[in-house]
Amino acid sequence: MTAPPVRDEGEDRMEIRFDHTTLGQRVLFGTGAAATNIAAALRDLGASRPLLVGGGHAAEVVDQISEQFAVAGHVREVVQHVPAERARDAVALAQGADADSVVAIGGGSATGLAKIVARDTRLPVVAVPTTFSGSEATDIWGMTEDERKTTGTDLRVLPRVVVYDATLTLGLPTDLAAHSGLNALAHAVDSLWAPRADPINRAMAGEGMRALIPGLSGLRANPADVRANEQVLYGTYLSGVALASAGAGMHHKICHVLGGTFNLPHAPTHAVVLPYVAAFNADADPDSDACIAEALGALHAASGLWDLAREVGAPDSLAEIGLTEDDVDLAAELATAAIPDSNPRPVSLEGVATLIRSALRGDDIRG
Ligand code: NAD
């Protein structure tokens, strides 16, 4: 693990020592400017034959891009968790139609498919998010074959340009927006305990949380609030960058098992599990607990996250989204094996099983 600043007991000042890599990516952020910014991004990349992926929730943007560019092909139907067969079809389409770039307009599933095309063809991706998944900010790809999801990191899949436009998230159903936004918040929180946590990604995570939390409350009060949508997109980006830089921690490992092995839905699973992981780590990492609590305006991270999840309409428990008591032991076994050593509190099979069981019931952890 990269060392965070170390407090020298003999001095007031802290020694600062870390090894941080900042990934190169252009971000164009502007409400109502998606089509203009996509066009500018493509031209600056020297691209003129984009493969379009997704776009079902942004018909006007798709029309405007199609009028200006010789679109090489359009993969309209996008499926969660990137089934390998569909990914191979998209790669073949890009190659057969001589595409010189990929424009993904949609949630994490559209971005995820574009990433596999980029991995296999080296084409540059312009990502245009319509949810708060944050996938656009990471060099992490995922693909599912024979009911098993494989993930990896590869710089070729990092979108070269991200185009954020808050008008594209205005149509998100309220629950979907809440779950997706809590998924973004989980990126920031989990990065604090991740293997490559350092002061730079910590700063990104802190600012990400301070944007996401009020933004999510604002969205709940009024989903059509453009400024709240902007705030959540801004926080989503920072949190995704923090996660990409720091790596995945305990929370993501648990959610990955729950999604991959038990087919629980991605964003709602994150929304339910996060307060329980915060409670698990609270005493072992008081600095991170205080950082999260401060952003929430709460006394403790876990209770603040628990309240926020209920305020914005997250599911109450893992049972509500499909996990059963019979699944707990296997889930705990698989997750325990994957949790990185960087986790501040030592992890045991029994501890992880207790955590998952608590989230399964939706225990009130406010103490
Ligand atoms: P998603 O892309 O599957 O979208 C969820 C639903 O929302 C879909 O039905 C979609 O059609 C709909 N939708 C999207 N935008 C909409 C809009 N503006 N209005 C109305 N409906 C809209 O789900 P997601 O939560 O965005 O992404 C989840 C996927 O992303 C998972 O496969 C997950 O593993 C992946 N992911 C990857 C990373 C990474 O770094 N690689 C990070 C986060 C998530």
Image (spheres, rainbow, N blue to C red):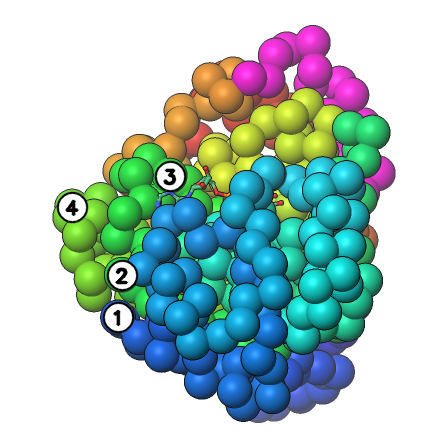
Dot 4: within a 10 Å radius of its alpha carbon, few (fewer than 14), some, or many (20 or more) residues?
some
Question: Which amino acid type is marked by label 1?
Answer: Gly
Mark 1 or mark 3, which has the lower sequence index?
Answer: 1
Circles 3 and 4, Cβ within 8 Å, touching? The answer is: no
Residue at numbered disc 1: 32
Residue at numbered disc 3: 176
| Image quadrant containing the N terminus | bottom right
Mark 1 or mark 2, which has the lower sequence index?
Answer: 1
Dot 3: within a 10 Å radius of its alpha carbon, few (fewer than 14), some, or many (20 or more) residues?
some
| Image quadrant containing the C terminus | top left
Looking at the picture, how far across and down is residue 319, in whole percent?
Answer: 52, 16
Q: Secondary structure at mark 3?
A: helix
Mark 4 or mark 1, which has the lower sequence index?
Answer: 1
Name the side, left or right, on which 153 lies relative to 23: right
Camera-near label (1 vs 3) is 1
Separation of residues labelled 4 and 1 (CA atoms): 22 Å
Disc 3 Cβ-to-ligand 1 distance below 8 Å: yes
Separation of residues labelled 2 and 3 (CA atoms): 16 Å
Camera-near label (3 vs 4) is 3
Judge whether 286 appears above or below 36 on screen: above
Looking at the picture, how far across and down is residue 348, in whole percent?
Answer: 78, 34
Residues in magenta, as a range: 322-339
User: Which of 66 and 157 lies nearest the eye of the viewer?
Assistant: 66
